[in-house]
Image: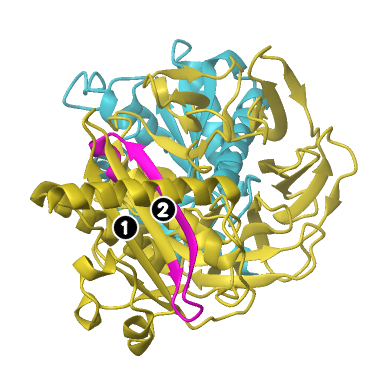
Chain colours: A yellow, B cyan
Amino acid sequence: MNNSATSFVSAVALVLAVALGSGVPARAELNVDITQGFVEPLPVAITDFYAETLEESKTGKDLAGVISADLERSGLFRPIDHGAFIQDAASLRKGPRFSDWRLINAQALIQGSVEMQPDGRLRVNFRLWDVFAEQQMTGLAYFTTPSNWRRVAHIVADVIYKRLTGEDGYFDTRLVYVAESGPQNRRVKRLGIMDQDGENHRFLTAGNELVLTPRFSPTTQEITYLSYIGEIPRVYLFNLNTGQQEVLGDFPGMTFAPRFSPDGNKVIMSLADNGNSDIFTMDLRTRGVKRLTNHPAIDTSPSYSPDGRRIAFNSDRGGSQQLYVMDSDGGNVRRVSFNQGRYATPVWSPRGDLVAFTRMSNGEFYIGVMRPDGSGERMLTKGFLVEGPTWAPNGRVLSYFRQTPADSRGRVTSKVYTIDLTGFNERELTTPIDASDPAWSPLIP
Amino acid sequence: MRFKLLTLFAAALLVAACETAPEETAAVDTSGVVEQPAAQPASPGGPTPGSQEDLLLNVGDRIFFAFDRSDLNADSRGTLEKLASWMTTYQNVTITIEGHCDERGTREYNLALGERRSDAARDYLVALGVDGGRVTTISYGKERPAVLGSNEDAWAQNRRDVFVVN
């Protein structure tokens, strides 16, 4: 029994390897159209990954659970309850009985297996089936250390997402954010980091000093953020591998609002000099500093376009806080926000086609998007205080934070949310304590 | 019109705050005041000359701003004139001006606005003859409200500069 099972898995692995090398034949039938506003989620059957031993079976079940949760949270898929499954796991290993899956209206079927290797690594195989076309859409095998199973689940979910939507996934990512506790006037703020599903949470700083606005490097395991170490607000780098913190430059005034350039070689930020905030870049290799704006107005919250050629920022140079776009050398500044209210925190989409922002109008805050020329403005969500959008690396999902007004005892709560670019599928991202200033990582390399 | 109303409001609050000032200040303003345990009264009669308590009692430790503004109103200028004179009396004293904002703005913009507010006060002190080297500024944006609450009353009191004796 064991022997024949082992040889079956090897055979599958071979087939998978071939499929991986030659490329899976593309099919058009099963496809989630994500260009519409609201899409009916695609029903998918995600079976527990098969394994021979009890321990491996648990991992197989956990893998399926994480994949299922990833796909469900995207709002584009509806995992079918396991109780409805007709074909059992053992017979599924010999191949799907598609009629059984069609009966429960599964459009796609995901199956997999888990096996510990003699060298201590875990092998995870999976296959994605188009139930109605009765065809395999993709199948892959991964080898990993057993403790890394969660990442494999996210990677598999990304492959499935891409195969079914045609767009890159965003599940194998993390968010860095500011964890908050205590009353508003003595709020303790710490850097926190977690997987995009809230798992593997840990704090990066102890809370001894105020920290704000962390942002991921697009290329390295580094974060840039604002810290009040020594009661001097300045921009720092935090190295996620070493845990080291390093101040960026030695300026007479406050440095704040940092973000990396798309190539990861520069940090763009505001520097306050005699009360006036302008935008500068610092080259991380040479430490050379370049001034980009020189205006008595507040110029802050700069964000590069993904091609590095333009920079969006907010300024009150026109009398109130509005969005502007300039060339990366600081030239050709033009205002792009013109509707009612104040506009802030422009963040360029990783796709380059949109800029997300915070808007304040008539006592409410909004998260919205517009094209970089200011056209096509659209609000995604609103509230007493919603602020600080950040994009998932596929430019499809945004995160931001939402703070409640103070209750009768002066207490507020602040939570991080995610929302689809369409404005649907708004969800809280559960954190151990209050949270603000989320920043999405690129796909983990 | 709205600004005028708010200014009046702020002035009224300032008066109200004075009536209960010692306790409330100790309770809410932990950013600088708490770290000055030396500022004990030298005698039962009054605060140590040149101390934070002295500044609070004889000058006032804060000024207020209109929404999204950093210009000084007549009340603020009056307080700063008293502060300049007080600093002339106590030549060894150096101060930090903390710039603060209400919660109705975005974080980074408010850091810049708080910087502007603290610098506006510093500029005025320097214009009144105070050595700029005795006055440092720091912005806390919306991170350290003095008053908890999400209403016009709280916001008016949170849009402020606070003077802290170093």
Q: Residue drawn 46% across and 22% down?
A: B95
Residue linked to disc 2: A156
Amino acid, disc 1: Gly
Q: Residue drawn 86% across and 45% down?
A: A333
What is the chain identity of the residue bearing mark 2?
Answer: A
Considering every residue shown, the one lying at the far bottom of the view is A103
Relative side of A264 to A183, left or right: right
- Disc 1 crowd, CA 10 A, few/some/many (<14, 14-19, 20+): many
In the depicted structure, whether residue B31 falls above or below residue A351? above
Q: Earlier in the sequence, mark 1 or mark 2?
A: 1
Relative side of A329 to A84, left or right: right
Magenta residues (range): A129-149
Q: Are marks 1 and 2 in contact (CB under 8 Å)?
A: yes
The numbered disc on residue A112 is: 1
User: In the image, residue B75 lies at what x, y percent?
Assistant: 56, 47
User: In the image, residue A353 lies at what x, y percent?
Assistant: 74, 58
Q: Is residue A265 visible?
A: yes
